[in-house]
Image (cartoon, helix red, strand yellow):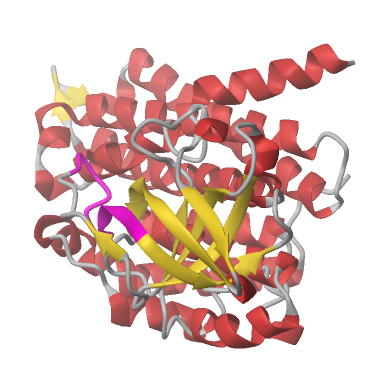
Amino acid sequence: MDFDLTDEQRALQDMARDFAARELAPHAAQWDKDEIFPEATLRQAAELGMAATYVSEANGGSGLGRIEAAILFEELAFGCTSTAAYLSIHNMVAWMIDRFGTADQQSRFLPDLVSMTHFSSYCLTEPDAGSDAASLKSRARRDGDFYVLDGSKAFTSGGGRSDLYLVMARTGGEDAKGISAFLVERDRAGISFGQNEKKLGWHSQPTAMVHLDGCRVPAANRLGAEGDGFRLAMAGLDGGRINIAACSLGAARACLERSLGHVRERRQFGQTLASFQSVQFTLADMATELDAARLMVHRAALKLDAAAPDATMAAAMAKRFATDVGFSVVDRALQLLGGYGYLEDYAIERYFRDTRVHRILEGTNEIMRLVIARRLLEG
């Protein structure tokens, strides 16, 4: 058991931290205000291997592990949480093709995803199938060498802009085993998109409905066998939960650092805020909880790489704890800054808006508790 990063991991951390400081943080406020999807910056990240962090080297990826991805996403989220979160979703789709795709699918789709010439989206949630994802209603009907897809997907990050959509649709019965996964290109007839959703946060990435109306997709675009879709979707989410937890760590650390600077300088009642014991206790709790969350995230990442039997539970625990702690740390940082924390000029309000959704997506934290409880009760 070694809690220190290796030299290689520290080099990755330094690279990501430098990129976030140069290319993300200076622009994050403008991207948020004007709802800009920073395509050129994302492609710069891809040039450094960040679009395919744990895609195999054989398929052009960086071939790194989940803990390296967690280190990476924490640093990127420190600079711009919204942009880092989109990049984590793109990584998830690329990995699923690398892990479960055919050689033909890998050669057709991965080069453009690795370089971010093309952007990707993950489509599981529907208007009436959120936490109960296995109840999804989208259908895929076999028609010779094609499938015909009908249905709608909700809350799709990258919706309307992404070039490739990983869509879960029902090919069989009404349970999870009746779901299959399909790779649907943006330019196929029958796919359309709703308007960009107006959201509390995550303004640097578009979010829109994806509509499928008689969309003909080659059978060669089915990812895995018929009936494998839900299993593949959940495998992707194990890593996605660790990544979004890491994004919460980065946002929380950014706000903790800002609050430390503020309380050292701000004076009230003749002394700095840092002199008050109540402030000291708040800071101590924030730092302690953040450190505990990071340890849980890194442990879950190691378990996922090792294919440990309890990796799914560990990922759920890390996601539940780190996203709750991350938002709480951001909230307390805002409180320490008082009225200044509520102003756009001080950035914490943006982190507050961007981290709130982390407790909802990739499985709500209530669903994480169910995942954990079911694993415990199986024993």
State the image quarter where residue 58 is shown.
bottom right
Instruction: Name the residue nearer the viewer: 148 or 269.
Output: 148
Q: Residue at x 56, y 81 (%)?
A: 109
Question: x%, y% of residue 320?
Answer: 56, 28
Q: Quarter holding the N terminus?
A: top right
Residue 212 lies in magenta, yes or no? Answer: yes
Q: Residue at x 74, y 82 (%)?
A: 103
Question: x%, y% of residue 63?
Answer: 73, 75
State the image quarter where residue 271 is shown.
top left
Question: x%, y% of residue 302?
Answer: 78, 49
Q: In this view of the protein, can residue 295 be seen by the observer? A: no
Q: Residue at x 17, y 58 (%)?
A: 29
On the picture, is 40 further left or further right than 135? left
Q: In this view of the protein, can residue 199 be seen by the observer? A: yes
Q: Is residue 200 above or below residue 9?
A: above
- Tally of numbered tags: 0
Q: Magenta part of the protein: which range?
A: 199-213
Q: Residue at x 28, y 37 (%)?
A: 352
Q: Residue furthest front?
A: 144
